[in-house]
Image (cartoon, grey):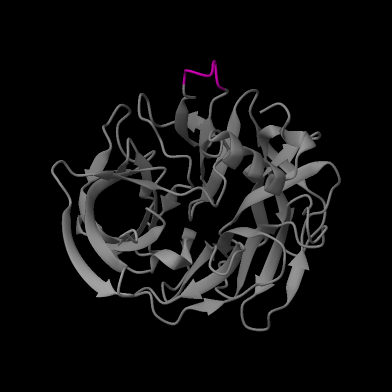
Amino acid sequence: MERFSELSRRGFVRAAALSGAGAAALSLPGTRAVASPLAGPATATTTSTPTSTTTTTSTTTATLAFTAGTNASVTASPAGDRLIIEVQGVLWSLPPEGGTATALSAPGLEPTRPAWSPDGSSIAVCAYQGGGFHLWTMAPDGSRLRQLTSGPWDDRGVAWAPDGRRVAFSSERGGDDATGGSYNIWTLDTRSGELTRLTGDPGVEDYDPTWHPDGDRVLFVRAGSAGGGGRTLASVPAGGGAVTVERTVDTGTLVGPAVSSDGRVACVLVASATGPATPPAVTLLVDGEPVTHGEDVSPQPPSWTSDGTLFYVADGRVRVRRPGREPAGTAAREIRFSASLDVPRPRYRRKT
């Protein structure tokens, strides 16, 4: 963690992938949520297709059923009448009271960090389809898929502006095509395609943007030599300008800030690891104060609705709180869901 300032975020992604650890600790937007399967055997069907006189290829389709997900995320529509959860690299639509989740995206899209437009008519995501992280939009039912950005750079962590026209995101665009560069905060006009870079200070990494409800500024997490290991919550005017420090923490890493309609800031704090065998504690904060205790909070952005309800994932489950509007110590309400995913498993018969 202390070496984070020496690496670009693309470099850190690669290092984490090679080491098999650490990606979740920084809540990298491309981190995949992994399903927790239901007890019992998976169901399967098998089809066989002859490919030659000596070799037969068969495909077995296993159905994975699950009710929870490690590193899963949840995003509520502005009115709170629909949820989108991201589990197993797939987006799922879920009623706010829970129930059976319906898949919205194909596995090949690999979308993360879904964000609803203010009017609820569109969803923006970061997706890996085509071999690079770029921004896409889709309708709430998964149709009308449209790619917004392209090029050799990573574009991540998308957030809609209150005007419903612009999105903010973090990107290394402008850096080296092969090795990447520092992440900065950008905006994109979804109608004209106009790109505007909001931050560009040297020696830092800026990511996880979110809009203030008045639309005049964008909040984000800053890491690097000037901001520590992701310990600074900062803001920048929506048209670019001087960066303002909003809040800092002494230890750990801030992840995924989200601003309510009345200006409260929720985010996740990933504590500094105490040893290789001890996973870091992860806590949900609102205005710097913890609202969860003893829950294993997913290192993904929480989600506010217009009435001040806060959705998040902890212990692999979707949970709901109303910070400041319920007595201290009130247990979170859990939203139960079930989903199933068909996973093809090709089998090959060796020639004899």
Query: Which one is nearer the viewer's eye here, 314 or 344?
Result: 344
Q: Which percent across, then down, holds residue 7?
A: 75, 39
Q: Which percent across, then down, holds residue 138?
A: 45, 75
Q: Which residue corresponds to the image point at 26% horizontal and 74% vertical from the top-left?
A: 49
Query: Which one is nearer the viewer's eye here, 121 or 265?
Result: 121
Query: Split into 4 quadrants, where in the image is the C terminus?
Result: bottom left
Seen as rendered, the residue at the extreme right is: 202
Query: Which one is nearer the viewer's eye here, 107 or 113?
Result: 107
In this rendering, position of residue 284 left or right of residue 152 = left
Above or below, comparing residue 301 to residue 93 in the picture = above
Query: Which one is nearer the viewer's eye here, 305 or 172?
Result: 172
Q: Does residue 289 appear in the picture of this structure?
A: yes
Query: Split into 4 quadrants, where in the image is the N terminus?
Result: top right
Q: Which residue corresponds to the image point at 73% horizontal and 77% vertical from the top-left?
A: 194
Q: Which percent across, then down, holds residue 98?
A: 21, 55
In this rendering, position of residue 294 left or right of residue 145 = left
> Which quadrant holds residue 45?
bottom left
Q: In this picture, which residue range is highlighted in magenta?
A: 273-278
Task: Please tell me whether residue 276 belongs to the stretch shown in magenta.
Answer: yes
